[in-house]
Image (spheres, helix red, strand yellow):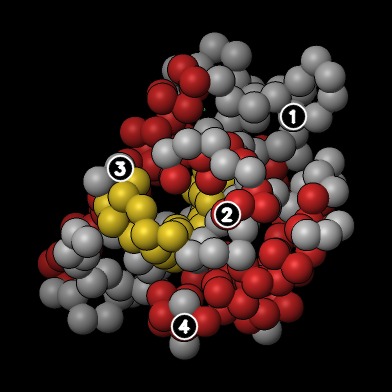
Amino acid sequence: MAATRERPSSLVPRGDAPRAVSDDRARLLALHESLDACRVCPNMIGPVVHGGPVFSPVYLLGQAPGPREGSFGRPFAWTAGRTLFRWFESVLGKDESAVRERVYFAAVARCFPGKAKGGGDRKPDPDEIRACSKFVAGELEILRPRLLLPVGGLAISQVLGKEQKLAAVVGQTFRATFHGLACDVIPLPHPSGASTWHQTEPGKTLLAAALRLVASHEAVKEAFR
Ligand code: SF4
């Protein structure tokens, strides 16, 4: 297991030297600036969407924003978000704004990919995933989270390194190395209404198990204390 540095859990991290804190904050804000300016993927639809500069030991990785998130300027701002935040509230007792203040929200791709031919949102293609991965790598390097929460099949496959059936991974904690960072991983299903997996068995039971793992993880306890 690779050694991990202790990182701060809030916008004003505890325990770090003031100089290091301001350096990391400046680096994260600079990364957000280059993210906001990014137009490298010709088939992606802007604007770029990302969460706030939250220094947290918990890093949530979604797939990509949907069509509504751009106008709200934050990830998980529409129906899937309502479900996701309801899941967290059920085990953490914290509402959406508290979760957004304490968890770093990222995604495999930060622009809306458009609609797929068969309906639903198009998945980011390999070139887009590769192009956007530099932002994920940069965030992980700055934040050094101890817990990753990949949400949905695409994010889970990116973090665990191969495609997995949800039933084979949801409800468990993994140890993985992602962009050079060794950390715990608790996969979650996508909360989209387009997916019924989490509403039927075995998804309901496995989701409940995964949420209990999230609530009892030491990084989550630190983030919310
Ligand atoms: S998806 Fe990522 S890499 Fe592609 S244009 Fe948007 S921010 Fe840039």
Residue occupied by mark 2: 169
Q: Where is residue 83 in the image (x, y as percent from the top left)?
A: 78, 60
For the point 27% across and 81% down, the residue is 14
Residue occupied by mark 3: 179
Please say whether residue 95 is visible from this viewpoint.
Answer: no
132 horizontally vs 5: left or right: right
**Mark 2: amino acid:** Val
Gap between marks 3 and 1 measured at Cα: 26 Å
* Location of residue 20 by image quarter: bottom left
**Label 1: few (<14), some (14–19) or many (≥20) C-alpha neighbours in 10 Å:** some
For the point 48% across and 65% down, the residue is 173
**Mark 4: amino acid:** Lys
Of the 4 image quadrants, the one containing the N terminus is: bottom left
Secondary structure state at the residue bearing disc 3: loop
Looking at the picture, tell me which residue is in the foreground, 220 or 112. Answer: 220
Residue occupied by mark 4: 221
Front: mark 2 or 4? 2
Please say whether residue 214 is visible from this viewpoint.
Answer: yes
Gap between marks 2 and 3 measured at Cα: 20 Å
Q: Height in image: 41 above or below 176?
A: above
Secondary structure state at the residue bearing disc 1: loop
**Mark 1: amino acid:** Asp
Nearest to N terminus: mark 2 or mark 4: 2
Nearest to N terminus: mark 3 or mark 1: 1
Gap between marks 1 and 2 measured at Cα: 23 Å
